[in-house]
């Protein structure tokens, strides 16, 4: 539907390939739209929960400005479940890239994995799986490291 609307009907974006920088817009939107919406819904519900907590009420009672309450006190605590969800859904993004690469004619690791499977090139397929695994493990490690910076309950001396 994105290709039909934005590439065929409106002619704003190229429908496939890598001709220009605008070629990345449709694949990126197609791949990330669902996860961006899910993360925003999760952030909204987490912010509503955090804004009702005791320490936020105490900060408001002490006279802290509304911007400081939202950005300093509430957002850091609300980002913890969002960051967890983002780390978990990375595997789905990687596997979803197989379909997006096929639809938008982008050469990538997904296309390489499909070609290796079709050609019975198992060492190449194993290498692609190892690269996907390393990407996922690295992202999980980065999420764990980001916990130390985001979670206000963790303090290092």
Image (tube, rainbow, N blue to C red):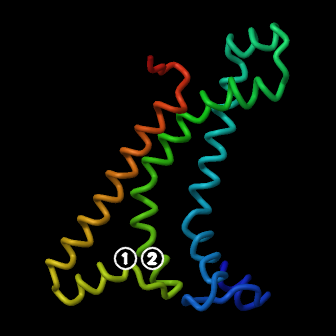
Residue at position x 24%, y 87% in the image: 118
Q: Residue at x 26, y 72 (%)?
A: 128
Element carrying mark 1: helix
Callout 2: 10 Å neighbours few (<14), some, many (20+)? some
Q: Nearer the viewer, mark 2 or mark 1?
A: 1
Percent x, y of residue 124? 20, 79
Q: Residue most toward the front? A: 157
Where's the C terminus, which quadrant? top left
Q: Secondary structure at mark 2?
A: helix
Q: Work out how far the residue at label 2 is from the one at label 1, CA to CA, in angstroms.
A: 8 Å
Relative side of 137 to 101, left or right? left
Which residue: 16% across, 86% down? 120
Q: First in sequence, mark 2 or 1: give its number.
A: 2
Proximity of marks 2 and 1: CB atoms separated by less than 8 Å = yes
In the image, taking residue 2 as reference, residue 153 lies left or right, namely left
Q: What percent of the width, then of the height, locates residue 138?
A: 35, 52
Q: Residues within 10 Å of mark 1 (few under 14, many from 20)?
A: many
Position in image of residue 122 (x %, y %): 15, 79
> Does residue 45 sit above or below 74 in this rendering?
below
Tell me the number on the disc at residue 99: 2
Residue 36: image location, x then y, percent: 62, 55
Q: Which mark is residue 110?
A: 1
């Amino acid at each position: 539907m994105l290709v039909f609307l934005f590439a065929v009907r409106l002619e704003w974006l190229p429908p496939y390939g890598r001709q220009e920088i605008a070629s990345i817009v449709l694949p990126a939107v197609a791949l990330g739209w669902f996860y961006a919406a899910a993360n925003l819904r999760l952030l909204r519900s987490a912010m509503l929960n955090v804004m009702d907590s005791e320490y936020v009420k105490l900060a408001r009672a002490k006279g802290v400005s509304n911007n400081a309450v939202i950005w300093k006190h509430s957002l850091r605590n609300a980002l913890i479940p969002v960051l967890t969800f983002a780390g978990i859904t990375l595997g789905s993004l990687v596997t979803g890239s197989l379909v997006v690469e096929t639809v938008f004619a982008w050469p990538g690791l997904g296309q390489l994995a499909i070609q290796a499977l079709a050609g019975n090139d198992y060492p190449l397929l194993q290498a692609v799986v190892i690269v996907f695994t390393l990407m996922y493990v690295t992202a999980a490690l980065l999420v764990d490291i980001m916990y130390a910076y985001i979670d206000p309950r963790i303090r290092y001396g």
